[in-house]
Amino acid sequence: MNFSLEGRTYVVMGVANKRSIAWGIARSLHEAGARLIFTYVGERFGKSVRELAETLEGQEPLFYECDVTDDESIIQTFESIQNDVGTIHGLAHCIAFANREELKGEFLNTSRDGFLTAQNISSYSLTAVARAAKPLMKDGGSILTMTYLGGEKVVQNYNVMGVAKASLDANMRYLASNLGKDNIRVNAISAGPLRTLSAKGVGDFNSILAEIEERAPLRRPVTQEEVGDTAYYLLSDLSRGVTGEIIHVDSGFNIIG
Ligand code: N5H
């Protein structure tokens, strides 16, 4: 079987800058020969993703603004993609948000608004996007989202995002169950900590990485490329028998008690 992504089209949501996990995924898909479509929110990120995409040789990417808090924006985005390219073969959902002030201190103090914001952007958006993308996956497809250990175990400071990732994990499994009959698979990657824009401003990120170096089986943090290559596996036919799964790309950290 040929696992090149030549002739295949993938939507990548959530590139903010060159450190973004979404950007690592885009590069791996590009290397495998895929055609790429990017969505972004706001002109700042629109400019950034356009500049980055220019560095992908031979790629003629398409760009769409998509605000995942707005159902109309999601529907519009996928209708435009349908009009412009017809069929897509997969989608990488790399989107999350929680208020900065609720990513420290006690989870107990989480506000209703902050809780709902995290759930809305970090979990519900996957449901809404999967529904809008389904009609474009005419030959079947693969949907991928990004999760984190803090949704399975209590991780200091992850707080409201931990509850949102637990919701996202279940969301992914229910979608996998619904979409299997259409030959659409839905999976998640649980990445080890990476210095992305999301991680920026996280107090003591160095000590989080130091713990990985000390305790993770591989004794080192993972790279954007390693996450990108697992995304390639999940988005290609290499993983054709896999759905509803979470793959930890975390140097094995999650198995350590
Ligand atoms: C245990 C930790 C450290 C605590 C960090 C939590 C990070 C949570 C992720 C969310 C998505 C970060 C977030 O929403 C930040 C925003 O409040 C402020 N930033 C922004 O608005 C920027 C401009 C935009 C681009 O960000 C977003 N998200 O739109 C976890 C770490 C060890 C691992 C980690 C960093 C996990 C993760 O989920 O990203």
Image (tube, rainbow, N blue to C red):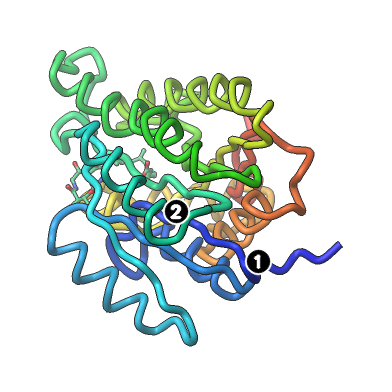
Residue 26 percent across, percent down from the top left: 48, 65
Residue drawn at x 50%, y 61% as measured from the top left = 25
Looking at the image, residue 250 lies above or below residue 18:
above
| Secondary element type, mark 2 | helix
Which residue is denoted by mark 2 in the rendering? 209
Circle on res. 231: none
Q: Give me the residue at 67% from left, 28% from top.
A: 180
Q: Amino acid at mark 2?
A: Leu
Spatial CA span between label 2 and label 1? 34 Å
Question: Residue beneath label 1, please?
Answer: 5
Does any atom of ligand 1 lie closer than 8 Å to the CB of label 1?
no
| Image position, residue 144 (x, y; %) | 53, 43
Q: How many marks?
A: 2
Q: Is residue 125 left or right of residue 211?
A: left
Q: Is residue 222 left or right of residue 104?
A: right
Residue 168 lies in quadrant: top left
Who is closer to the viewer here, 70 or 93? 70
Which image quarter holds the N terminus?
Answer: bottom right
Question: 152 and 42: which one is in front?
Answer: 42
